[in-house]
Image (cartoon, rainbow, N blue to C red):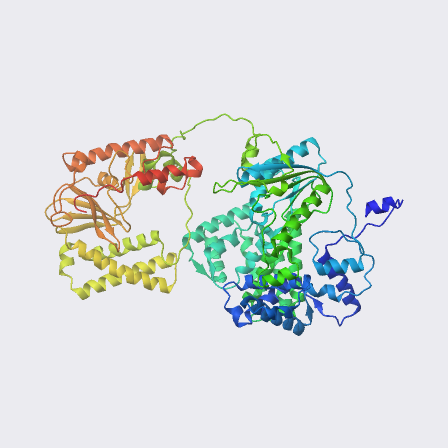
Amino acid sequence: MDRLHLAAGHAVWPTPAIRDFDGWLLERYTERQQRDASLPRALTDFEERELWRAAILATEIGRECLEPDGAAASARRARRAMLEHGIPFRALTAHQTPEALALLEWNAAFEARCQELECIPADRLLTELAPDIGRVAWIDSPSWRPVARRWLQTHGGAPLAPARTGSAAVMRRHEASAPDAELAAIAHWAAGELAVQPNYRAWILIPDLRSRRSEVEDAFDAALAPQRFRFDGTRDPAPYAIAGGTALADYAPVRAALCSLRALTGPLAFEDLSALLRLPELHASPSEAAAVAQLDVMLRERGPSEAPLRTWLALARRLAHERVSAALPALARIERCAELVTALPGAQPLTYWASVWLQAFQAAAWAWPERWSSTEFQAAERFRDVVVGLAAAAALFGSRGAASALGLLQRAARDTVFQPQTGVPPIAVSGHIMDPWLDYDGLWIAGCDADRWPPPVAAIPLIPLPLQRQFGVVAATAALQFELAVDLERRWRRCADRCVFSCAAPTDGRAVHLSPLLSESSPLELAAVTTRPHWQAFAMHAPRLERLNDEQAPPVGTDERTRGVATLQAQSRCAFRGFAQVRLACDSLDRPVPGFNQRERGTLLHRVLEEVWSTLRSSAQLAALAPAERTALIRRSVVGAVDAQAAQRDPGREWQRRERGRLEALIDKWLQVESLREPFEVEAVEQGMQIGRFGGLEFHVRIDRCDRLVQGGRVLIDYKSGNVGADWRGERPDNPQLPIYALLQRQELVAVAYAKVNASECGFVAETARNGVFKPGGRRSALEGQPDFTALVDLWAARIETLAAQFAAGNAAVAPTLRACASCDLQALCRIPSAQGESADAESTGAATAGADE
């Protein structure tokens, strides 16, 4: 338009209103509707999708569809294609295919619903325009469908002539070894052209952009915008923009708003509650966010796996009052949001829900809009428009409950594609093969291998193929696709100085070459281009740093405390693990599970057996116990243990009932194993905390049980609810627990053992100095080659002293044992290759052999 005014000698002219055709049709129809209120209301894009979905689900064949949303999208596309190509719906009756009949039925249901609601879909707007539409200028493009093209030719005259009048572009080709190499080459080419000519403008076509958007962003950031990933907060704009946008629900303000609403409908899983509590949008300051993080850790220990929001908030308030010193305004914001949404229960019109939602957003997720970036602000405003649009369509959707209304809002946010405005960068990336309409310095067309160029036949679903060919649907025939490819190539060469066509070999190793249609192009020589993530691109320009391998921590201070046996267990498996877990408190976060978790089940087992043996006191009393008395003792012990554990974290009555039944059967099975042992008396159960001193440090230890054998000698027992082996042997034992027990109770000691109490197998894993201690016919163990148990305990003492001394001295070397990495999650700190733990675990021969009495 500027060129035409300049040619006419004008110095000043009005800025033309440039619109896409669908948007322009809606504007014209809206203006006409303002003059004539009797006209039906135009449906929004989301309203059309929902009407199609409802129309399909209202038919028998639609209810049988596995993917109603996909069927609705296909039916909507097919109807639009028929109207755009002038295909009459009565033509479908001549083709008695199931797809054609389904399309007829679904379209009839959709039309009936539109008439009932007095609405008009977007594909009917062209027929409703009044003849007097003012001056219209249009740009010729293969994207115009026949009906629209004829209308434009009638009302707008001839299309605008191409703005570019120079010679055809120089054509180049590039064949990449892999898809990611092709993206790297494109980004490298764009960066090189911008370095030479800062005002260089390029248009890049990547046909499969929708499925590879994240890969494209990584490749272009690596070459064009590595500054985006600096830790100093630099947010310089990138010199490229990717067209098409992403789902509105993916943007932070929208995601936070939806998260706050989802928490109010039905039971809330802990993972969802945790995500809600830790939303940055809910916290006024970093200190407030840190306090909520502390609360999150406590909820992991004390909370159920699932509960209503009000139950979660009550528990959170109680825990915060007990253990968190800082105030937690985030809880008050969530409560205020809940009060707004649940103020009026039952089904309500969307006008009500829209008003409540917006108030809830302001009270919680949108409390600090001043902290938003430009993109986040635009996304929030677009989401506000979506909410208001749903309210305007209240008559269409009817009254709905909170969950149903929220489902509608979630689909709207997911189906609405949003592209923030970021200015006009020099590099434009698109996924549409139609010509770019504007003039550029250079074009790059990717995906031009022989299999994809010309584009393969891609008929529109539901419309019979003969009908598509009859009415000239381009994608339905190879001939029309060929003509389209030739036409597009001609247009591309006309609007740029240079055109580059590329293809990439697939990952399966097949050889792929450029399409024969592009044989005129000459090879494009690029410097060596390597594919790399964006962080590597930034690291390439980082300063060279001095490498220091520091594996020595400060010695343990007098005010530092150990974690008992767990300290030496971690130190034995890997010195760094002992340092990180004990001194740096690098603990894995718990996650509430349905029922009692593994740690809680271990606690329950200890409590039940403590009560049972505190009552029985000897194997003789166990043998003398009548079956009914034995059952009553087990049941009483189990009920008391479950009640005590539920007071700490209650998983619900049903889980308590299940756990009681499981424990009763397990303890009965275990007592049968105990009845086969050499006669014994229980000397102590769950002895009070004992203090051992090793390597100059104090270690607090609690021994589960100590038995005195009638034939002489004492036995130390530790209960285990999992599958265990003799893991206390060797210079660096996986678990030095039993050796430490032995060092604290050396007098008359003849055996130490794990009591393996689980449903799959019950028994003892032991180190014993004589035969038959734990079962008839059981043999003494090898005692690691020592002549007697006293010598073995002396050997253990030397090992424990060494481990404790290394920990006390601050030894933090990354030196794991064979299988240590398989049970460790500290690889991000120690930087040891994660594969080492996996390969070591695979090569190991399994758990060490158990003692003779196992």
Q: Is residue 666 visible?
A: yes
- Nearer the observer, 580 or 711: 580
Q: In which quadrant of the rendered view does residue 814 lie?
A: top left
Image position of 105 (left or right of 629): right
- Nearer the observer, 607 or 194: 194
- Nearer the observer, 577 or 4: 4
Q: In the image, what residue occupies the spot 79% across and 60% down?
A: 154
- Nearer the observer, 219 or 319: 219
Q: Does 125 appear above or below 301?
A: below
Q: Does 251 appear above or below 575?
A: below
| x, y percent for residue 643 | 33, 61
| x, y percent for residue 87 | 66, 65
| x, y percent for residue 539 | 55, 32
Q: In the image, what residue occupies the spot 14% across and 34% down?
A: 787
| x, y percent for residue 598 | 34, 52
Q: Does 333 appear above or below 740?
A: below
Q: Is residue 232 visible?
A: no
